[in-house]
Amino acid sequence: MRLLARPAAQHTLDELAAPYAVARSTSSDDVLLLDRLAVEQGIGRVQAVPGKGGGVRFLPGASPAAARDTIAAFASVMRDPARVLPGGFMYLTDLVCSPDWSHRLGVVFAAVMRQAEPTHVLTVETRGIPIALMTAHQLGLPLLIARRDARVTEGPALSITYLSATTGSVQNMSLPRRALRAGARVLIIDDFMRGGGTAKGLTDLVGEFDAVVAGIGMAVVTGQPADKRVGRFLPLAVLQRVDEANRWVELEPNLELQWFTGRRPVAPT
Amino acid sequence: MRLLARPAAQHTLDELAAPYAVARSTSSDDVLLLDRLAVEQGIGRVQAVPGKGGGVRFLPGASPAAARDTIAAFASVMRDPARVLPGGFMYLTDLVCSPDWSHRLGVVFAAVMRQAEPTHVLTVETRGIPIALMTAHQLGLPLLIARRDARVTEGPALSITYLSATTGSVQNMSLPRRALRAGARVLIIDDFMRGGGTAKGLTDLVGEFDAVVAGIGMAVVTGQPADKRVGRFLPLAVLQRVDEANRWVELEPNLELQWFTGRRPVAPT
Protein backbone atom coordinates (compact mmCIF):
# COMPACT_ATOMS: atom_id res chain seq x y z
CA MET A 1 0.00 0.00 0.00
CA ARG A 2 2.86 2.33 0.74
CA LEU A 3 4.31 1.56 -2.66
CA LEU A 4 1.21 2.74 -4.50
CA ALA A 5 0.64 5.80 -2.36
CA ARG A 6 4.00 7.27 -3.37
CA PRO A 7 4.82 6.31 -6.95
CA ALA A 8 8.46 5.98 -7.98
CA ALA A 9 9.63 6.56 -4.39
CA GLN A 10 12.05 4.00 -3.09
CA HIS A 11 11.15 1.99 0.00
CA THR A 12 13.46 -0.34 1.90
CA LEU A 13 12.34 -3.91 2.44
CA ASP A 14 12.64 -3.40 6.22
CA GLU A 15 10.33 -0.40 6.06
CA LEU A 16 7.75 -2.27 3.99
CA ALA A 17 7.93 -5.42 6.09
CA ALA A 18 7.76 -3.66 9.47
CA PRO A 19 3.96 -3.33 9.81
CA TYR A 20 3.50 -7.02 9.06
CA ALA A 21 6.22 -8.43 11.34
CA VAL A 22 7.64 -10.59 8.58
CA ALA A 23 11.21 -11.33 7.59
CA ARG A 24 12.99 -9.48 4.77
CA SER A 25 13.15 -12.60 2.63
CA THR A 26 9.38 -12.94 2.70
CA SER A 27 9.04 -9.41 1.40
CA SER A 28 11.58 -10.20 -1.30
CA ASP A 29 9.38 -13.00 -2.63
CA ASP A 30 6.39 -10.69 -2.40
CA VAL A 31 8.01 -8.22 -4.76
CA LEU A 32 7.76 -10.79 -7.55
CA LEU A 33 4.12 -11.47 -6.69
CA LEU A 34 3.28 -7.76 -6.55
CA ASP A 35 4.99 -7.19 -9.89
CA ARG A 36 2.95 -9.96 -11.50
CA LEU A 37 -0.28 -8.49 -10.12
CA ALA A 38 0.63 -4.98 -11.33
CA VAL A 39 1.41 -6.24 -14.83
CA GLU A 40 -1.79 -8.31 -14.97
CA GLN A 41 -3.85 -5.27 -14.03
CA GLY A 42 -1.98 -3.07 -16.49
CA ILE A 43 -1.11 -0.47 -13.85
CA GLY A 44 2.70 -0.64 -13.92
CA ARG A 45 5.62 -2.56 -12.42
CA VAL A 46 6.96 -3.28 -8.95
CA GLN A 47 10.74 -3.41 -9.03
CA ALA A 48 13.48 -4.38 -6.62
CA VAL A 49 16.32 -1.86 -6.47
CA PRO A 50 19.51 -3.84 -5.76
CA GLY A 51 22.54 -2.86 -3.71
CA LYS A 52 23.18 -1.02 -0.47
CA GLY A 53 20.42 1.48 0.23
CA GLY A 54 18.31 -0.44 -2.29
CA GLY A 55 14.69 -1.42 -1.81
CA VAL A 56 11.46 -1.64 -3.68
CA ARG A 57 9.59 0.83 -5.83
CA PHE A 58 6.32 0.97 -7.74
CA LEU A 59 6.64 2.35 -11.27
CA PRO A 60 3.11 3.14 -12.39
CA GLY A 61 2.33 2.75 -16.04
CA ALA A 62 -0.53 2.00 -18.35
CA SER A 63 -0.62 -1.04 -20.60
CA PRO A 64 -1.49 -0.17 -24.23
CA ALA A 65 -5.03 -1.48 -23.60
CA ALA A 66 -5.45 0.61 -20.44
CA ALA A 67 -4.12 3.71 -22.23
CA ARG A 68 -6.59 3.16 -25.09
CA ASP A 69 -9.47 2.87 -22.62
CA THR A 70 -8.47 6.13 -20.95
CA ILE A 71 -8.05 8.03 -24.23
CA ALA A 72 -11.34 6.72 -25.66
CA ALA A 73 -13.21 7.71 -22.48
CA PHE A 74 -11.55 11.14 -22.48
CA ALA A 75 -12.56 11.74 -26.11
CA SER A 76 -16.09 10.64 -25.36
CA VAL A 77 -16.61 13.15 -22.50
CA MET A 78 -15.03 15.91 -24.60
CA ARG A 79 -17.54 15.39 -27.41
CA ASP A 80 -20.43 16.45 -25.15
CA PRO A 81 -22.35 19.17 -27.11
CA ALA A 82 -22.85 21.12 -23.85
CA ARG A 83 -19.11 21.93 -24.02
CA VAL A 84 -19.53 24.17 -27.07
CA LEU A 85 -19.17 27.81 -26.00
CA PRO A 86 -20.12 31.02 -27.81
CA GLY A 87 -17.43 31.84 -30.39
CA GLY A 88 -16.73 28.19 -31.24
CA PHE A 89 -14.61 27.62 -28.15
CA MET A 90 -14.90 24.53 -25.98
CA TYR A 91 -15.26 24.35 -22.21
CA LEU A 92 -12.55 21.88 -21.16
CA THR A 93 -11.43 23.48 -17.89
CA ASP A 94 -13.37 21.07 -15.67
CA LEU A 95 -11.77 18.11 -17.47
CA VAL A 96 -8.14 19.20 -17.61
CA CYS A 97 -8.36 20.45 -14.00
CA SER A 98 -10.22 17.39 -12.73
CA PRO A 99 -8.13 15.39 -10.22
CA ASP A 100 -9.45 12.13 -11.66
CA TRP A 101 -8.89 12.98 -15.34
CA SER A 102 -5.55 14.69 -14.78
CA HIS A 103 -4.46 11.58 -12.86
CA ARG A 104 -5.62 9.20 -15.61
CA LEU A 105 -4.03 11.25 -18.41
CA GLY A 106 -0.88 11.68 -16.30
CA VAL A 107 -0.62 7.88 -16.00
CA VAL A 108 -0.76 7.56 -19.80
CA PHE A 109 1.85 10.29 -20.37
CA ALA A 110 4.12 8.78 -17.71
CA ALA A 111 3.90 5.33 -19.28
CA VAL A 112 4.84 6.60 -22.75
CA MET A 113 7.40 9.22 -21.72
CA ARG A 114 9.32 7.18 -19.13
CA GLN A 115 11.52 5.66 -21.84
CA ALA A 116 12.77 9.15 -22.81
CA GLU A 117 14.30 9.27 -19.30
CA PRO A 118 13.22 12.80 -18.35
CA THR A 119 14.60 14.43 -15.21
CA HIS A 120 11.98 17.21 -14.91
CA VAL A 121 8.42 17.92 -16.03
CA LEU A 122 7.67 21.45 -17.26
CA THR A 123 4.39 23.24 -17.96
CA VAL A 124 3.17 26.84 -18.09
CA GLU A 125 0.47 28.31 -15.87
CA THR A 126 -2.46 27.65 -15.54
CA ARG A 127 -4.55 24.90 -17.05
CA GLY A 128 -1.66 22.59 -17.90
CA ILE A 129 -0.62 22.30 -14.27
CA PRO A 130 -2.92 19.47 -13.08
CA ILE A 131 -2.00 17.01 -15.87
CA ALA A 132 1.69 17.97 -15.66
CA LEU A 133 1.67 17.53 -11.87
CA MET A 134 0.07 14.08 -12.08
CA THR A 135 2.53 13.05 -14.83
CA ALA A 136 5.44 14.21 -12.67
CA HIS A 137 3.99 12.41 -9.63
CA GLN A 138 3.77 9.15 -11.57
CA LEU A 139 7.34 9.54 -12.81
CA GLY A 140 8.68 10.61 -9.40
CA LEU A 141 10.09 13.82 -10.93
CA PRO A 142 9.98 17.50 -9.89
CA LEU A 143 7.46 19.79 -11.63
CA LEU A 144 8.45 23.20 -12.99
CA ILE A 145 5.81 25.81 -13.72
CA ALA A 146 6.76 28.65 -16.09
CA ARG A 147 5.12 31.91 -15.01
CA ARG A 148 3.65 34.57 -17.28
CA ASP A 149 5.38 37.20 -15.17
CA ALA A 150 8.48 36.92 -12.97
CA ARG A 151 7.71 37.14 -9.24
CA VAL A 152 9.98 38.84 -6.74
CA THR A 153 9.22 36.03 -4.28
CA GLU A 154 10.90 33.48 -6.54
CA GLY A 155 14.30 35.16 -6.79
CA PRO A 156 16.36 35.63 -9.96
CA ALA A 157 14.61 34.28 -13.06
CA LEU A 158 15.30 33.56 -16.73
CA SER A 159 12.69 35.03 -19.11
CA ILE A 160 11.87 34.73 -22.79
CA THR A 161 9.31 36.37 -25.04
CA TYR A 162 7.32 34.37 -27.58
CA LEU A 163 4.50 34.78 -30.08
CA SER A 164 1.21 33.16 -29.10
CA ALA A 165 -0.82 32.10 -32.14
CA THR A 166 -3.97 31.83 -29.99
CA THR A 167 -3.89 35.43 -28.78
CA GLY A 168 -1.80 36.85 -31.66
CA SER A 169 0.32 38.77 -29.18
CA VAL A 170 3.86 38.67 -27.83
CA GLN A 171 3.93 37.07 -24.37
CA ASN A 172 6.46 36.58 -21.62
CA MET A 173 7.43 33.39 -19.75
CA SER A 174 9.94 32.85 -16.97
CA LEU A 175 11.43 30.22 -14.68
CA PRO A 176 13.45 30.77 -11.49
CA ARG A 177 17.18 30.63 -12.19
CA ARG A 178 17.58 27.88 -9.61
CA ALA A 179 14.79 25.70 -11.02
CA LEU A 180 16.83 23.88 -13.67
CA ARG A 181 20.47 22.86 -14.17
CA ALA A 182 22.43 22.45 -17.41
CA GLY A 183 22.00 19.00 -18.94
CA ALA A 184 18.57 18.36 -17.47
CA ARG A 185 16.13 16.37 -19.65
CA VAL A 186 12.80 18.18 -19.64
CA LEU A 187 9.41 16.69 -20.47
CA ILE A 188 6.95 19.41 -21.57
CA ILE A 189 3.28 18.71 -20.73
CA ASP A 190 0.37 21.05 -21.49
CA ASP A 191 -3.40 20.81 -21.87
CA PHE A 192 -3.96 22.43 -25.28
CA MET A 193 -1.96 23.35 -28.38
CA ARG A 194 -3.13 25.37 -31.37
CA GLY A 195 -0.19 26.88 -33.28
CA GLY A 196 2.51 25.56 -30.95
CA GLY A 197 3.81 29.03 -30.02
CA THR A 198 3.65 28.36 -26.30
CA ALA A 199 5.32 24.95 -26.65
CA LYS A 200 8.01 26.59 -28.83
CA GLY A 201 8.47 29.22 -26.10
CA LEU A 202 8.87 26.51 -23.45
CA THR A 203 11.41 24.75 -25.71
CA ASP A 204 13.40 27.98 -26.06
CA LEU A 205 13.24 28.53 -22.30
CA VAL A 206 14.66 25.03 -21.70
CA GLY A 207 17.46 25.87 -24.14
CA GLU A 208 18.33 29.00 -22.14
CA PHE A 209 19.22 26.72 -19.23
CA ASP A 210 21.41 24.54 -21.51
CA ALA A 211 18.92 21.75 -20.85
CA VAL A 212 17.22 19.57 -23.49
CA VAL A 213 13.60 18.69 -24.29
CA ALA A 214 13.03 14.95 -23.73
CA GLY A 215 9.48 15.01 -25.13
CA ILE A 216 6.30 17.07 -25.59
CA GLY A 217 2.89 15.75 -24.50
CA MET A 218 -0.43 17.55 -25.13
CA ALA A 219 -3.87 16.51 -23.90
CA VAL A 220 -5.62 18.11 -26.91
CA VAL A 221 -4.26 19.66 -30.11
CA THR A 222 -6.20 21.32 -32.92
CA GLY A 223 -6.05 19.75 -36.38
CA GLN A 224 -5.48 23.23 -37.89
CA PRO A 225 -2.94 24.69 -38.39
CA ALA A 226 -1.19 21.41 -39.25
CA ASP A 227 2.23 23.06 -39.23
CA LYS A 228 2.81 23.50 -35.50
CA ARG A 229 5.84 25.47 -34.41
CA VAL A 230 7.39 22.48 -32.59
CA GLY A 231 8.92 19.35 -34.04
CA ARG A 232 7.66 16.14 -32.47
CA PHE A 233 4.78 15.90 -30.00
CA LEU A 234 2.31 13.39 -28.59
CA PRO A 235 -1.36 14.46 -28.47
CA LEU A 236 -4.01 12.33 -26.76
CA ALA A 237 -6.78 13.79 -28.94
CA VAL A 238 -7.03 15.95 -32.08
CA LEU A 239 -9.81 18.55 -32.23
CA GLN A 240 -10.82 18.94 -35.88
CA ARG A 241 -13.88 21.17 -35.73
CA VAL A 242 -16.27 22.84 -33.30
CA ASP A 243 -19.59 23.55 -35.03
CA GLU A 244 -21.20 26.23 -32.87
CA ALA A 245 -24.50 26.40 -34.78
CA ASN A 246 -25.18 22.66 -34.59
CA ARG A 247 -23.36 22.18 -31.27
CA TRP A 248 -21.27 19.44 -32.73
CA VAL A 249 -17.66 18.54 -31.98
CA GLU A 250 -15.40 16.62 -34.37
CA LEU A 251 -12.58 15.04 -32.40
CA GLU A 252 -10.22 12.09 -32.98
CA PRO A 253 -8.76 10.14 -30.06
CA ASN A 254 -5.10 9.16 -30.58
CA LEU A 255 -5.76 5.56 -29.56
CA GLU A 256 -2.48 4.21 -30.91
CA LEU A 257 -0.45 6.95 -29.17
CA GLN A 258 1.14 8.06 -32.44
CA TRP A 259 3.66 10.88 -32.38
CA PHE A 260 2.85 13.88 -34.57
CA THR A 261 5.28 16.13 -36.39
CA GLY A 262 4.87 19.84 -37.07
CA ARG A 263 5.05 19.55 -40.86
CA ARG A 264 6.55 22.89 -41.74
CA PRO A 265 8.35 24.10 -38.63
CA VAL A 266 8.81 27.88 -38.64
CA ALA A 267 12.37 29.16 -38.25
CA PRO A 268 13.14 30.66 -34.84
CA THR A 269 12.36 34.38 -34.75
CA MET B 1 -4.10 -1.93 -6.26
CA ARG B 2 -6.93 -0.40 -8.24
CA LEU B 3 -8.36 0.96 -5.02
CA LEU B 4 -5.24 2.94 -4.18
CA ALA B 5 -4.60 4.17 -7.70
CA ARG B 6 -7.93 6.03 -7.77
CA PRO B 7 -8.75 7.35 -4.28
CA ALA B 8 -12.40 7.74 -3.28
CA ALA B 9 -13.56 6.18 -6.56
CA GLN B 10 -16.05 3.38 -6.16
CA HIS B 11 -15.21 -0.06 -7.52
CA THR B 12 -17.59 -2.99 -7.74
CA LEU B 13 -16.58 -6.26 -6.13
CA ASP B 14 -16.91 -8.00 -9.49
CA GLU B 15 -14.52 -5.52 -11.08
CA LEU B 16 -11.96 -5.92 -8.31
CA ALA B 17 -12.23 -9.69 -8.18
CA ALA B 18 -12.05 -10.19 -11.95
CA PRO B 19 -8.25 -10.22 -12.39
CA TYR B 20 -7.88 -12.82 -9.65
CA ALA B 21 -10.64 -15.19 -10.72
CA VAL B 22 -12.09 -15.35 -7.21
CA ALA B 23 -15.66 -15.29 -6.00
CA ARG B 24 -17.35 -12.11 -4.76
CA SER B 25 -17.55 -13.40 -1.22
CA THR B 26 -13.80 -13.84 -1.06
CA SER B 27 -13.37 -10.22 -2.07
CA SER B 28 -15.88 -9.23 0.58
CA ASP B 29 -13.73 -10.81 3.30
CA ASP B 30 -10.71 -9.11 1.81
CA VAL B 31 -12.27 -5.70 2.29
CA LEU B 32 -12.05 -6.20 6.05
CA LEU B 33 -8.43 -7.32 5.79
CA LEU B 34 -7.50 -4.38 3.54
CA ASP B 35 -9.20 -1.96 5.92
CA ARG B 36 -7.22 -3.33 8.86
CA LEU B 37 -3.95 -2.99 6.92
CA ALA B 38 -4.78 0.58 5.87
CA VAL B 39 -5.59 1.59 9.44
CA GLU B 40 -2.43 -0.07 10.79
CA GLN B 41 -0.30 1.82 8.28
CA GLY B 42 -2.11 5.08 9.00
CA ILE B 43 -2.94 5.67 5.33
CA GLY B 44 -6.75 5.64 5.44
CA ARG B 45 -9.71 3.28 5.31
CA VAL B 46 -11.09 0.72 2.87
CA GLN B 47 -14.88 0.74 2.96
CA ALA B 48 -17.65 -1.38 1.54
CA VAL B 49 -20.44 0.67 -0.06
CA PRO B 50 -23.66 -1.29 0.47
CA GLY B 51 -26.68 -1.58 -1.79
CA LYS B 52 -27.32 -1.95 -5.50
CA GLY B 53 -24.50 -0.34 -7.49
CA GLY B 54 -22.41 -0.54 -4.33
CA GLY B 55 -18.84 -1.71 -4.10
CA VAL B 56 -15.59 -0.88 -2.41
CA ARG B 57 -13.64 2.34 -2.09
CA PHE B 58 -10.37 3.48 -0.58
CA LEU B 59 -10.64 6.66 1.50
CA PRO B 60 -7.09 7.87 2.00
CA GLY B 61 -6.33 9.65 5.20
CA ALA B 62 -3.46 10.29 7.56
CA SER B 63 -3.43 9.13 11.16
CA PRO B 64 -2.50 11.90 13.63
CA ALA B 65 0.99 10.38 13.90
CA ALA B 66 1.45 10.24 10.11
CA ALA B 67 0.20 13.84 9.77
CA ARG B 68 2.67 15.00 12.45
CA ASP B 69 5.53 13.25 10.63
CA THR B 70 4.60 14.97 7.36
CA ILE B 71 4.25 18.43 8.94
CA ALA B 72 7.52 18.10 10.89
CA ALA B 73 9.40 17.02 7.76
CA PHE B 74 7.82 19.85 5.74
CA ALA B 75 8.87 22.42 8.38
CA SER B 76 12.37 20.99 8.42
CA VAL B 77 12.93 21.38 4.64
CA MET B 78 11.43 24.89 4.75
CA ARG B 79 13.95 26.02 7.37
CA ASP B 80 16.86 25.49 4.94
CA PRO B 81 18.85 28.79 4.97
CA ALA B 82 19.40 28.48 1.20
CA ARG B 83 15.67 29.33 0.85
CA VAL B 84 16.18 32.92 2.03
CA LEU B 85 15.89 35.28 -0.95
CA PRO B 86 16.93 38.92 -1.32
CA GLY B 87 14.29 41.16 0.29
CA GLY B 88 13.52 38.67 3.08
CA PHE B 89 11.34 36.48 0.88
CA MET B 90 11.53 32.71 0.89
CA TYR B 91 11.87 30.36 -2.06
CA LEU B 92 9.09 27.81 -1.53
CA THR B 93 7.99 27.25 -5.13
CA ASP B 94 9.85 23.97 -5.53
CA LEU B 95 8.19 22.62 -2.36
CA VAL B 96 4.58 23.68 -2.91
CA CYS B 97 4.80 22.63 -6.58
CA SER B 98 6.58 19.34 -5.84
CA PRO B 99 4.42 16.31 -6.74
CA ASP B 100 5.66 14.45 -3.67
CA TRP B 101 5.15 17.27 -1.16
CA SER B 102 1.86 18.44 -2.63
CA HIS B 103 0.67 14.84 -2.42
CA ARG B 104 1.77 14.44 1.20
CA LEU B 105 0.27 17.78 2.29
CA GLY B 106 -2.89 16.99 0.31
CA VAL B 107 -3.25 13.73 2.24
CA VAL B 108 -3.08 15.66 5.54
CA PHE B 109 -5.62 18.29 4.41
CA ALA B 110 -7.94 15.57 3.07
CA ALA B 111 -7.79 13.65 6.36
CA VAL B 112 -8.68 16.72 8.45
CA MET B 113 -11.18 18.33 6.07
CA ARG B 114 -13.16 15.22 5.13
CA GLN B 115 -15.40 15.60 8.20
CA ALA B 116 -16.55 19.04 6.95
CA GLU B 117 -18.10 17.15 4.01
CA PRO B 118 -16.93 19.44 1.22
CA THR B 119 -18.30 19.01 -2.31
CA HIS B 120 -15.60 21.02 -4.13
CA VAL B 121 -12.02 22.17 -3.60
CA LEU B 122 -11.16 25.75 -4.63
CA THR B 123 -7.84 27.53 -5.08
CA VAL B 124 -6.53 30.49 -7.04
CA GLU B 125 -3.81 30.34 -9.67
CA THR B 126 -0.89 29.53 -9.53
CA ARG B 127 1.15 28.10 -6.69
CA GLY B 128 -1.80 26.79 -4.67
CA ILE B 129 -2.87 24.48 -7.50
CA PRO B 130 -0.66 21.43 -6.81
CA ILE B 131 -1.63 21.06 -3.13
CA ALA B 132 -5.29 21.81 -3.87
CA LEU B 133 -5.31 19.27 -6.71
CA MET B 134 -3.81 16.53 -4.54
CA THR B 135 -6.27 17.35 -1.72
CA ALA B 136 -9.17 17.12 -4.18
CA HIS B 137 -7.78 13.86 -5.61
CA GLN B 138 -7.63 12.31 -2.15
CA LEU B 139 -11.18 13.44 -1.38
CA GLY B 140 -12.52 12.38 -4.80
CA LEU B 141 -13.83 15.92 -5.41
CA PRO B 142 -13.63 18.32 -8.37
CA LEU B 143 -11.06 21.13 -8.26
CA LEU B 144 -11.94 24.72 -9.15
CA ILE B 145 -9.21 27.21 -10.03
CA ALA B 146 -10.07 30.92 -9.75
CA ARG B 147 -8.36 32.92 -12.49
CA ARG B 148 -6.81 36.36 -12.16
CA ASP B 149 -8.50 37.32 -15.43
CA ALA B 150 -11.61 35.91 -17.09
CA ARG B 151 -10.86 33.90 -20.26
CA VAL B 152 -13.10 33.90 -23.31
CA THR B 153 -12.44 30.17 -23.67
CA GLU B 154 -14.16 29.44 -20.37
CA GLY B 155 -17.49 31.08 -21.16
CA PRO B 156 -19.54 33.33 -18.86
CA ALA B 157 -17.81 33.97 -15.54
CA LEU B 158 -18.48 35.53 -12.13
CA SER B 159 -15.82 38.01 -11.01
CA ILE B 160 -14.99 39.88 -7.84
CA THR B 161 -12.36 42.45 -6.93
CA TYR B 162 -10.40 42.23 -3.68
CA LEU B 163 -7.57 43.94 -1.86
CA SER B 164 -4.32 41.96 -1.70
CA ALA B 165 -2.29 42.80 1.42
CA THR B 166 0.81 41.26 -0.15
CA THR B 167 0.82 43.49 -3.22
CA GLY B 168 -1.19 46.36 -1.70
CA SER B 169 -3.29 46.57 -4.86
CA VAL B 170 -6.83 45.80 -5.94
CA GLN B 171 -6.98 42.51 -7.81
CA ASN B 172 -9.52 40.56 -9.81
CA MET B 173 -10.59 36.92 -9.49
CA SER B 174 -13.14 34.93 -11.48
CA LEU B 175 -14.71 31.50 -11.84
CA PRO B 176 -16.74 30.17 -14.78
CA ARG B 177 -20.48 30.55 -14.15
CA ARG B 178 -20.97 26.83 -14.69
CA ALA B 179 -18.23 25.78 -12.23
CA LEU B 180 -20.30 25.88 -9.05
CA ARG B 181 -23.94 25.43 -8.07
CA ALA B 182 -25.88 27.03 -5.22
CA GLY B 183 -25.56 25.07 -1.97
CA ALA B 184 -22.13 23.62 -2.77
CA ARG B 185 -19.73 23.20 0.16
CA VAL B 186 -16.36 24.58 -0.84
CA LEU B 187 -13.00 23.75 0.72
CA ILE B 188 -10.47 26.55 0.07
CA ILE B 189 -6.83 25.40 -0.19
CA ASP B 190 -3.85 27.66 -0.88
CA ASP B 191 -0.08 27.60 -0.40
CA PHE B 192 0.54 30.86 1.44
CA MET B 193 -1.41 33.47 3.44
CA ARG B 194 -0.16 36.81 4.72
CA GLY B 195 -3.07 39.21 5.39
CA GLY B 196 -5.80 36.86 4.22
CA GLY B 197 -7.00 39.19 1.44
CA THR B 198 -6.90 36.50 -1.22
CA ALA B 199 -8.66 33.96 1.04
CA LYS B 200 -11.27 36.61 1.84
CA GLY B 201 -11.69 37.22 -1.91
CA LEU B 202 -12.20 33.48 -2.52
CA THR B 203 -14.76 33.41 0.32
CA ASP B 204 -16.66 36.30 -1.28
CA LEU B 205 -16.51 34.57 -4.66
CA VAL B 206 -18.01 31.41 -3.14
CA GLY B 207 -20.78 33.59 -1.66
CA GLU B 208 -21.59 35.01 -5.10
CA PHE B 209 -22.55 31.47 -6.16
CA ASP B 210 -24.78 31.07 -3.07
CA ALA B 211 -22.38 28.35 -1.97
CA VAL B 212 -20.72 28.05 1.45
CA VAL B 213 -17.11 27.70 2.64
CA ALA B 214 -16.63 24.32 4.35
CA GLY B 215 -13.07 25.08 5.49
CA ILE B 216 -9.85 26.94 4.70
CA GLY B 217 -6.48 25.16 4.62
CA MET B 218 -3.11 26.89 4.11
CA ALA B 219 0.30 25.25 3.74
CA VAL B 220 2.11 28.24 5.28
CA VAL B 221 0.81 31.40 6.98
CA THR B 222 2.82 34.32 8.33
CA GLY B 223 2.66 35.07 12.07
CA GLN B 224 2.17 38.79 11.29
CA PRO B 225 -0.30 40.32 10.85
CA ALA B 226 -2.13 38.18 13.42
CA ASP B 227 -5.51 39.61 12.45
CA LYS B 228 -6.10 37.83 9.14
CA ARG B 229 -9.10 38.88 7.08
CA VAL B 230 -10.72 35.43 7.30
CA GLY B 231 -12.33 33.75 10.29
CA ARG B 232 -11.19 30.20 10.85
CA PHE B 233 -8.35 28.50 8.99
CA LEU B 234 -5.94 25.57 9.31
CA PRO B 235 -2.24 26.28 8.63
CA LEU B 236 0.35 23.49 8.48
CA ALA B 237 3.16 25.87 9.45
CA VAL B 238 3.49 29.43 10.76
CA LEU B 239 6.33 31.56 9.41
CA GLN B 240 7.38 33.99 12.17
CA ARG B 241 10.50 35.61 10.78
CA VAL B 242 12.92 35.53 7.86
CA ASP B 243 16.26 37.01 8.88
CA GLU B 244 17.91 37.89 5.59
CA ALA B 245 21.24 39.06 7.08
CA ASN B 246 21.83 35.88 9.08
CA ARG B 247 19.98 33.62 6.62
CA TRP B 248 17.84 32.26 9.39
CA VAL B 249 14.18 31.20 9.28
CA GLU B 250 11.90 31.09 12.32
CA LEU B 251 9.02 28.73 11.59
CA GLU B 252 6.60 26.72 13.75
CA PRO B 253 5.06 23.48 12.50
CA ASN B 254 1.39 23.09 13.45
CA LEU B 255 1.93 19.53 14.69
CA GLU B 256 -1.38 19.29 16.54
CA LEU B 257 -3.34 20.59 13.54
CA GLN B 258 -4.88 23.42 15.55
CA TRP B 259 -7.33 25.74 13.84
CA PHE B 260 -6.41 29.43 13.91
CA THR B 261 -8.77 32.38 14.10
CA GLY B 262 -8.23 35.79 12.53
CA ARG B 263 -8.36 37.70 15.82
CA ARG B 264 -9.74 40.99 14.62
CA PRO B 265 -11.57 40.24 11.38
CA VAL B 266 -11.89 43.34 9.23
CA ALA B 267 -15.43 44.30 8.21
CA PRO B 268 -16.26 43.60 4.55
CA THR B 269 -15.37 46.57 2.35
Image: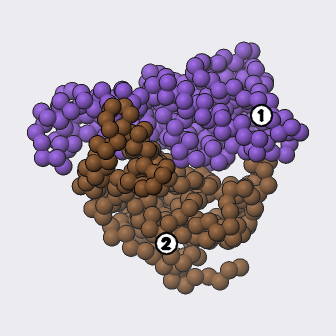
Chain colours: A purple, B brown
> Which element carries disc 1, helix, strand or loop?
strand
The residue sitting at 45% across, 55% down in the picture is B51
User: Residue B250, can we see it?
Assistant: no
A120 sits to left or right of A236:
left
> Which element carries disc 2, helix, strand or loop?
strand
| Chain letter belonging to callout 2 | B
The residue sitting at 12% across, 46% down in the picture is A21
**Residue B161 spot, x, y in % from top left:** 73, 67
To the question of a shared chain for discs 1 and 2, the answer is no
A51 up-or-down from B40: above or below: above
Residue wearing tag 2:
B233
A256 sits to left or right of B153:
left
Distance from the alpha carbon under mark 1 to that under mark 2: 43 Å
Nearest the viewer among A77 and B52 is: B52
**Residue A205 spot, x, y in % from top left:** 60, 32
Give the quarter of the image for residue A54: top left
Nearest the viewer among A228 and B152 is: B152
Evaluate if marks 1 and 2 touch, with contact meaning CB atoms under 8 Å apart: no
Question: Which residue type does callout 2 highlight?
Answer: Phe
Q: Quadrant of the C terminus of chain A?
A: top right
**Residue farthest toward the right in the current orientation of the protein:** A245
| Chain letter belonging to callout 1 | A
Question: Which residue type does callout 1 highlight?
Answer: Val
The residue sitting at 44% across, 21% down in the picture is A115
Residue wearing tag 1:
A249
**Residue B110 spot, x, y in % from top left:** 44, 59
User: Residue A55, can we see it?
Assistant: yes
B63 sits to left or right of B136:
left
Give the quarter of the image for residue A228: top right
